Image (cartoon, rainbow, N blue to C red):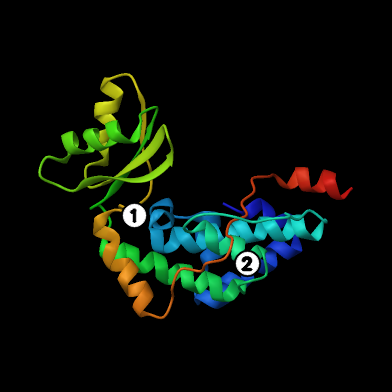
Amino acid sequence: MGRDLAENFPESRAIFDAADGALGFAITKLCFDGPEEELKLTENTQPAILTVSTAAYRALEKRGIAPDFVAGHSLGEYSALVAAGSLDFADAVKIVRNRGRYMQEAVPPGEGAMAAIMGLPPGEVTDLCKQAADQEVVTPANLNSPERGCGKARRGNCIAKRREARGDAAGVGTISFAANGTRATPAGTRFTRGGIRSLALPAHYQCRCRSDQLRRRSA
């Protein structure tokens, strides 16, 4: 992820270099070459996403493409704050690395999963989680819209299987822990005790583009 940006835009390459320097290890190599299982660990995923998002933004910014507003949620706050000039990238990437590490330690790899549920209202998602729990923790987490939510816990696969048996849309994500569920609460406590609190500024600029699109714009 992000290799195309780094190879074609110096300002994007500078962001990858800055991330490596701030973190003290080559997150760039992990983004470009994996291994995928390491990249999926949220303590690596979070700084990787921030780095690639900021690298894309810098390429756009260099070519006069900038948002009028930024907004977002959760991890997206940090890339948006960087884009807004409210948070230095080197500080942000270290913050999200710790954020991911605290989450990973609260819910070790293999003890959590996420299932994306589409096409059901929140009440039915709650009932589905209860059916799948089987004496373990299965709870609704992100209600992204009136008809899309995420159930997160150890038994994410069970949620997906129950949905698929009914012919509905469901999938188990590649996230390595049960984010936003009750088991992740200790991570938030550690984050706050460490002097880092939620940043109450508008948050998230995210783009998906290819380098050839940027080159056409700059031509």
Q: Give residue 76's mark.
A: none
Q: Are marks 1 and 2 in contact (CB under 8 Å)?
A: no
Crowding at label 2, few (<14), some or many (≥20) Cα neighbours within 10 Å?
many
Q: Secondary structure at mark 2?
A: helix
> 44 left or right of 193?
right
**Is residue 124 shown left or right of residue 143?**
left
Residue drawn at the location 33% of the way across and 36% of the way down: 122
Residue that label 1 marks: 180
Depth check, front residue: 7 or 15: 15
Task: Return the x and y of residue 9 as percentages of the image width and height.
Answer: 75, 58
Q: Nearer the viewer, residue 9 or 78?
A: 78
Q: Is residue 16 visible?
A: yes
Specify the quadrant of the image occupied by residue 144: top left
Q: CA distance from mark 1 to mark 2?
A: 23 Å
Name the disc covering residue 82, or none: 2
Tell me which numbered mark, 1 or 2, is placed earlier along the sequence: 2
In the picture, residue 121 is in which quadrant?
top left
Classify mark 1: helix, strand or loop.
loop
Badge 2 amino acid:
Val
Kindly identify the amino acid type of the residue bearing the numbered disc 1. Answer: Asn
Do we see residue 108 in this rendering?
A: no
Q: Is residue 17 above or below residue 178?
A: below
Choose between 205 and 60: the one closer to the eye: 205
217 relative to 123 in the view: left or right: right
